[in-house]
Amino acid sequence: MNAPGHRCACELQSKAVLYFGQGNLAARFTYEKLSPYSVFCRRHLPFDESFHHTHSLQEMEHISVSSSELFVRFDRQIEAITRETRDLFGSAVNKPEHLQAVLSELNLVSAEVDNASKVLQEKISGVTAKYSDNSDVAKTKRREYNEALFNFPWYSRRYLFTLASAWNERLSA
């Protein structure tokens, strides 16, 4: 409204008081010039290793518990599907070779669930052991171990998502 290109000298926007109403509510807007004191932007915050270490260990504990619950739910679901499959193939119309194919696929998925559970727990304990090692060699490799510790929660979530998506797809077929 008071753009420099218009060369308007009026102070309509800065001196006006605007009122808005809706039902039994009313709002009043006045314009005031603000002059900031100063602005300071830090290029980066200091890195607090202990905070990230604690947070990563908490995340790993949460992932460990959540993944264990996920694997147990998959095992229960596989058992339920196996029972339903056996009931479904109980009639003479269905061929036993189809039953064997379905049960074989369910056993493969069950074995993958068990293997993934073991692998993830081993990786969690391995990363935790690397960080808690206080030997001289470990102290020199602390930066490498920190990176493994700080990145592990993200990688493990991605791993679990990929596995669970594949299992869901196979179980829904």
Image: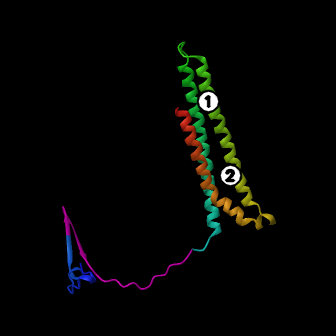
Q: Return the mark for residue 167.
A: none
Q: Which residues are magenta?
A: 20-44
Residue 55 visible in the displayed image: yes
User: Which numbered disc, 2 or 1, marks the residue that appears first in the sequence?
Assistant: 1
Q: Position of residue 52 (x, y in %)?
A: 62, 64
From the viewer's perspective, is residue 107 above or below residue 34? above
Q: Is residue 135 visible?
A: no
**Callout 1 amino acid:** Glu
Count of picture labels: 2
Disc 1 designates what residue? 105
| Residue 7 percent location from the top left of the image | 23, 85
Q: For this view, does 109 lie left or right of residue 84?
A: right
Residue for point 23% across, 79% down: 13
- Disc 2: which residue: 124
Label 2 sits on a secondary structure element that is helix
Dot 1 falls on a residue whose secondary structure is helix
Residue at 44 percent of width and 85 percent of height: 38
Q: In the displayed structure, does residue 21 sit left or right of residue 54?
A: left
Q: Quadrant of residue 6?
A: bottom left
Residue 44, quarter of the rendered image = bottom right
Residue 101: percent from the left, percent from the top?
Answer: 61, 25
Indicate the amino acid at tag 2: Ile
Main SS of residues in magenta = loop
